[in-house]
Image (spheres, coloured by chain):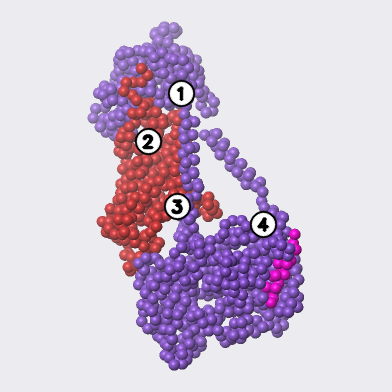
Chain colours: A purple, B red
Amino acid sequence: MRRVAALVAALALIGAVVWLVWPSPPPVRGQEQKIAVVDGPSDDQQVVLDTTFFPPAGGGKAPAVLLAHGFGGSKQSVRDQAVKLAGDGYAVLTWSARGFGRSSGQIALNSPDYEVKDVKQLIDWLAKRPEVALDKAGDPRVGITGGSYGGAIALMTAAHDARVDAIVPQITWYDLADSLFPDATGEGPENGVFKRMWAGFFFGRGAPTAQSITAQPKPLTEEEARCGRFLPEICSMYEEVAKTGKATTAAVELLRASSPASVPGRIKAPTLLIQGQRDSLFPLSQADANAKAVAPGTPVSVTWFDGGHDGGNGEADWVYEQTTAWLGRYLKDEGRAAPTFTVTRDGGRDPGTRQRIRLHPESSAYPGLGGTSTTQVPLTGPEQNVVNPPGGAPASISTVPGVGSLLGGGGQSQTSLSLDMPGQSAGFESAPLTAPLQLTGSPKVTLRVQAEPGTEVTLFAKLYDVADTMQPPMLPAGLVSPIRVTIPEDAQGADAAVTLPAVDHNFAAGHRLRLTVTTTDMGYATPAEPAGYKISLVTPAVSVPAVAALAAPPTGLAWWVWATPLAAIAVAAVLLALGRRRRTAGATGTGDPETPLAITGLTKAYSNGDKAVDDLSFSIEKGQVLGLLGPNGAGKTTTMRMMMGLIHPDAGEVRIFGEPVTPGAPVLSRLGSFVEGPGFLPHLSGRDNLELYWAATGRPAEDARFAEALEIAGLGKALERAVRTYSQGMRQRLAIAQAMLGLPDLLVLDEPTNGLDPPQIREMREVLKRYASDGRTVIVSSHLLAEVEQTCTHVVVMHRGRLVTTGPVSVLLAGAKSNGQGPRLEDVFLDLIGEKS
Amino acid sequence: MTAAPGYAPGRTLPLRVEIVRQFKRRRTLAMFALLLALPWVLVIAFQFGPQPSGQQPGVRMSDLATAGGLNFAAFALSVSANFLLVVAVALFCGDTVSSEANWSSLRYLLAAPVPRDRLLRQKLIVALGYSAAAVICLPLMALLAGTLAFGWDDIQVPGTGETIPALDVLPRFGIVIGYALVSQLVVAALAFLLSTVTDSPLGAVGGAVGLWIVSTILQAVEALGALREFLPTFWNTAWLDALAPEIDWGGMAKGASISITYAAILVAVAFRLFRRKDVVS
């Protein structure tokens, strides 16, 4: 045991030392750098960009990554990620875009005339760095990644600069006009509904210079107060559309110029689009459009992760892994190509922690928002009247921008905030689902809207997951589809084909789908005029797309699943094989099969080194009754245990009928023993105990001689009672009877008369004498010297583990000094052990 | 003549004898009585509780317990697998050698002589048999009680509320019980090892249950990350995967692998230590 403990301690120590001295990666140091660039429509505007360059951690030449920040941020907001990327062996350049942080210039919303030109010059700068690997002179091996505003610059730069080798745009837009003025009927942003709250947030973040809250605010000029750091024409555009809630053609043109929508087919860099499932600003449909805008033949992958502008888990580590895998594949030519389409799904709970876990099923093809198959789910509901409240208030709630993240949004089963106002919504519901329904993409419905001729009707369509009457309905990802329908002058109504928000959602069996159409939504600008409409379904069904191929990645069984049990069984086999005692050790010479017991040189030490038995040697002949004498602690019991094979001697050996005693040696079957008290199963009767004991020896029942043994026990009717009810003496007698079962050739009894009354002691004495007279041998240990004197023919006297003397009782007594009354064994004994009274 | 006539090491301590020796013990009978009574107690508890509102299936296993006999059996197994069955298995395997030492009957068996390896082998087989009987009897009695109380019905899957036909699910129920058996091997082996090194039955049973609790606590520490997968308790509830519409073998394969790994090593250590042990009890 001590060796095992030492081994464990040594291993723990080695582990700790290795952990402490394991080389940690060298720290990454950023180099602050002001880079002057020239941009503007006529290339005449001087701008100084505030940048930080992180050389690759491994040294040498490495591919470069331009890491862009989101709207309202600066190069500081991506610093941690830059350090991580540099640690992974990239030369990383972060910069504050013009109009942000300490860079000069004004915000132009990733315009090709401004920001795109800036980034092209950053690529020029990278091409001159000694740390950056080049494809050819002036053309560095470079990728761009970033989220939101930073994702759009990645797309725009890739479209305008062929030197870009890979991009990973995250949660970003395809068409800024369409994002801020969405219309789910597909009529375009001119017909769109103004996403009032998000637009306010978006433009608000570019407004007055971000200052630390403790600093005294600097007085702003009139222009600064009005437009913050925006370019004046963008500022004016926003003021106009925010006032009217309508996109003018000029505004759409301006916003589109800053959008990948203006450069379809020009992005030739391999593109990984990472879009958030919880994003009401740039929903999944924006990534879908971006995927289609990339030049044909260019590798494109789409990933829907659990995050986005509305919060969610964010999966920062997983998104980073996906990003570096993509960059590694196309910048370093290492790793496998990423799956074309990946979706984060709820994976139930971790079996250990019961925390929610996420699965990432993959598909080798990106099917778009229409899925690979669609299911028509019938919806029922009559034509319903809804009103637009005067002033558009109170408004229904689907998502509140910025609140989702404050709530620490979790997985897809999170309860949603959505709230519909009475009188403003029409509902159409399916029957309870008989099987789970997986929705991946944009469901479609066709609505009929009836209103006064010539009116413009603004509506919001959403698809709820209704569990039961107790739980509130759940709006997947909190997304709605705004619709604007214009009733023709010559008609009472119009039909609208509505594309519902793209989501990945599983409707459980027993749940219902509910299509709700409302007149208001807090996040959008709605008409102030009160009005009433009638809403009905043209076809009473919603078509639900699904992606069949989207199966969880086949992980297969980890190698350890089959390896560890096999290894463990091998280790177990080795442990058992090596632990086997060598039988040859005891076979030094052969003993005399006629000698019942021969002990030579027997030694056993306690764990503290004191010797319980020290070089003990004696033997015994057939027919003898041997008394084993000695004071407490003389080693009598230890010697007897070694005779029974219970204790391994340190040296010497015990032979019974010439056979060395080892644990379980077959010759022990000729030994009957009663050592250190009885041992019975207390719940069984005395008879059951003896019978089961004999059965455990495996010997034939007729050899047991139960009748003789039971007669010695003399328990009578008590034999049928449970042993736990026995007195000490009854147990003692039963134990002696057990020792005598089968009439063994050698009987070893330890203090057999303990607890017996005088008649029983006398009887026992006779039993032992008779037993030995049949040619069998008995060894009795006792401290009742008078007993021994009357019972035994021979004695062995032990003291402190050593043999003091051995011989026939008569010889021992004859050699003793007489004190007048004839020799007594007691005097002899005390004399021998040197404790004269 | 080296041995008494009729003696053969391979015939010592027959399984039948060891089964009888253990069966008449009060703790054996009490444990089985408890396991067989528990489903009926649960049935009564559900009868007293408020009836589930509406017809909509819930998603939690406890909501589904009254949906039918199969659902009830799954529920009974889920509430008992984490602790009650662990205690039962630890009791049968941890008590087997240490109680003999405690009663002093161990030395007489060894001097009979029952060879030490054989003694351990026979005791391990019988203890595992009793443990298996305990793990099996609970869900079977729950199936009986649930069927009588709530009727024979198709099983509703927790989580999605899907329905699997009863006849399809019966073989899966076999898988569930089989996995529950395999996953308890660790407790069994641990308790058995402790049983061979201590003379106190309480120490062996309590030690095994205690280490089990420590493992359960450790697996809640998410900072350990993937290391938790190698804790013996981590895959304890993986049998739920067998009741999913599509059987997912991954978790159960890992759980069985971990369980067998630990069990093989622990049992081997038990045999090795016991061979070299000086029996002084």
Q: Are callouts 1 and 2 both on one chain?
A: no
Q: Are callouts 3 and 4 both on one chain?
A: no
Q: Of discs 1 and 3, which sits in the foreground?
A: 3
**Mark 1 or mark 4: which comes first in sequence?**
4
Are the residues tagged 1 and 2 within 8 Å (C-beta)? no
Indicate whether residue A173 is drawn in magenta. Answer: no
Q: Tell me the number on the disc at residue B123.
A: 2
**Helix, strand or loop under label 2:** helix
Label 1 – label 4 distance at C-alpha = 63 Å
Q: Chain of mark 2?
A: B
**Helix, strand or loop under label 1:** helix
**Helix, strand or loop under label 3:** helix
Highlighted magenta segment, given as a residue range:
A113-130
**Mark 2 or mark 3: which comes first in sequence?**
2
Q: Of discs 2 and 3, which sits in the foreground?
A: 3
Q: Chain of mark 1?
A: A
Nearest the eye: B168 or B224: B168
Q: Are callouts 1 and 3 both on one chain?
A: no
Q: Tell me the number on the disc at residue A592.
A: none
Query: In the image, what residue occupies the spot 43% across and 35% down?
Result: B196
The type of residue carrying mark 3 is Gly
Query: In the image, what residue occupies the spot 50% across and 80% down?
Result: A186
Q: Tell me the number on the disc at residue A583.
A: 1
Residue A429 vs A822, above or below: the answer is below
Q: Tell me the number on the disc at residue B250.
A: 3
Query: In the image, what residue occupies the spot 75% across and 68% down?
Result: A34
